[in-house]
Amino acid sequence: MKAILKRYAMAIFFLLLVSVLMLLGTIGVKSLGEKMLENTGVEMKPRGEQLIK
């Protein structure tokens, strides 16, 4: 187990780093979009609600 961890430690580290950066980017874009539309009176709805009706 220790040999496997030693061999793939850098790959696991980069995988976790990329996952965290993607999560932070998604949260950042969502909060930025909400701030931009805060005082415009536009309500953001998921697209799925329109497709169901």
Image (cartoon, rainbow, N blue to C red):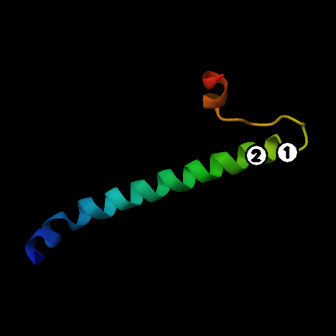
Would you name the residue on which mark 1 appears? 38
The residue type indicated by label 2 comes to Glu
Dot 2 crowding, Cα within 10 Å, few <14, some 14–19, many 20+: some
Q: Amino acid at mark 1?
A: Glu
Residue 46 at what x, y percent from top left?
65, 35
Asked whether the residues under the numbered discs 1 and 2 touch, taking CB atoms below 8 Å apart as contact, a structural biologist would say yes
Q: Is residue 21 above or below residue 5?
A: above
Mark on residue 51?
A: none
- Disc 2 on helix, strand or loop? helix
Residue at 66% of width from left, 22% of height from top?
53
Q: Which residue is mark 2?
A: 34
In the picture, measured across the screen, residue 53 lies left or right of residue 34, that is left
Callout 1: helix, strand or loop? loop
CA separation in Å, label 1 and label 2 = 6 Å
Residue at image position (63%, 29%) is 47
In the displayed structure, does residue 37 sit left or right of residue 23?
right
